[in-house]
Image (spheres, rainbow, N blue to C red):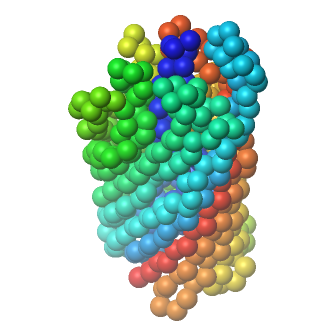
Amino acid sequence: MARRLRSLLLLAVWQAGAMSACAQMGHVLDAVGPINQSMGGAGVALPLDAIGALQWNPASITGLKRSEIGFSAMAFAPRMKLGSRVDADSFGSGFPAQDLQGSTTSDNGISPIPSMAMVHRDPESPWTFGVGGFAIGGFGVDYSLRADNPILTAQPPEGGLGFGNIYSQFQLMQFCPTAAYKVSPAWSVGFAPTFNWGTLAIDPFGATTPNPDGTYPSAAHGSSALGIGFQVGAFFESPTSDWNAGVSYKSPQWFEEFQFNAHDNTGGSRSLGIDLDYPSIISVGVAYKGFERIRLACDVRYIDYRNTAGFQAAGFDAAQAVTGFGWKSIWVASAGAEFELHERFKWRIGYCVNDNPIPAASAFFNHQAPAIVQNHLSTGVTCEMKSGWLCSMAYHYGFRNSVSGRWWNPATNSQIPGTRITNTLFTHGLTMGISKRF
């Protein structure tokens, strides 16, 4: 029974480190900036602003008609609920003595997600240069100890069967200096090295061996790490028709290990570490501009979580530490339309749908930050002011989704009958931005 109780704590600890943004395409944001967000993230072949172009296809910045600088921020509000059930005798005879069941909403609040970009476009030169800085991932979860939710009851040494409070905070920023070259009137290519910074705080921490009393150490003091990668792309803008096309590849973002100074239950020091990279992304897009005052775009992406460090098969090693999140790679489709209602006023609407990266069997390994939203609806407007200034706003809604699975036993690396974990998530996001074209 002690080992089974330890499994609850261990898995819960790992969830606190779940590297998901609590929404979007797993932990990859579906869009950046208000204009790209209002198109549902579609933009590989339709560069409407500097922020979206730099994020999804470095070659497409040659399609911007003027130089541009822009800033934006999203108020992102994920709404997460964690429910659990344990039938009587699930962890041994008389433990628990009766069925237990409950659910709890996370008190994580609203997170700011900033973006900025600058593109220099010289119509007389085949070269276009840009630089972008984006928050491309992040989450914060705060589940409090609850006597009416089995998985949030006190840790076993304190009389419960769960792990008490859970806290986690993650932020990920990316910086991308970019160069694009127009090789012909129709074709452009682009390249951008990507530099990343991330910070992570976890309490408790499950990707390690337990303390002498069977509990797991805290990594709430946090750790920061640097990462590097690259992005390449090609952009086609037909001079004889109304079609555009684009393709881009963003490499994995390879991070150094997140390292934490911690202590065990006796006060002895411990050094903790975890490898968490950002997945590679392949994007392909088309756009059509043949309708009067209407532009259409559609993108398809493949996000390779399965082969990314930290997301490998979920389970336990011989020391009863969790081995990975158990995410699968996913396909994503985004589509958007822009309507020019007035020469100075545009309205957009977009939709994004993606696979769920978390199978039911891995639900217990991801209940801290369940990245399970699969359908996203966005809309927004842009108002062009005098002297090239633009003000934009977008609203995003991630539709409610749930995934359920059993608790796991680290001693046998198997699911525990008579138990159930249910993760539920939906999201809201309001993005405001201002830009200047010159």
Q: Is residue 165 left or right of residue 221?
A: right
Whether residue 432 is visible to the viewer of this picture, yes or no, is: yes
Residue 96 quadrant: top right
Most foreground residue, 201 or 252: 201
Question: Can you say which quadrant of the picture contains the N terminus?
Answer: top right
124 and 412: which is toward the camera = 412
382 w.r.t. 112: above or below: below
| Residue 303 seen in the current view | no
Q: Quadrant of residue 416?
A: top right
Vertical side of 221 occupied by 423: above or below: above
For image coordinates 46% across by 16% down, the residue present is 316
Q: Nearer the viewer, residue 157 or 22?
A: 157
Picture coordinates of residue 200 (x, y %)? 38, 45
Badge count = 0
Q: Residue at x 69, y 13 (%)?
A: 94
Q: Residue furthest bottom?
A: 386
Q: Name the residue at 37% across, 44% down.
A: 220
Please report the residue visible at 44 percent of the width from the left and 64 percent of the height from the top. 115
Question: Residue 18: where, in percent of width, then height?
Answer: 48, 37
> x, y (%) of residue 335?
67, 53
- Residue 135 on image: x %, y %: 43, 57
Quadrant containing the C terminus in the rendered view: bottom left
Q: In the displayed structure, would residue 351 be above or below residue 280?
A: below
Say whether residue 272 is left or right of residue 33: left
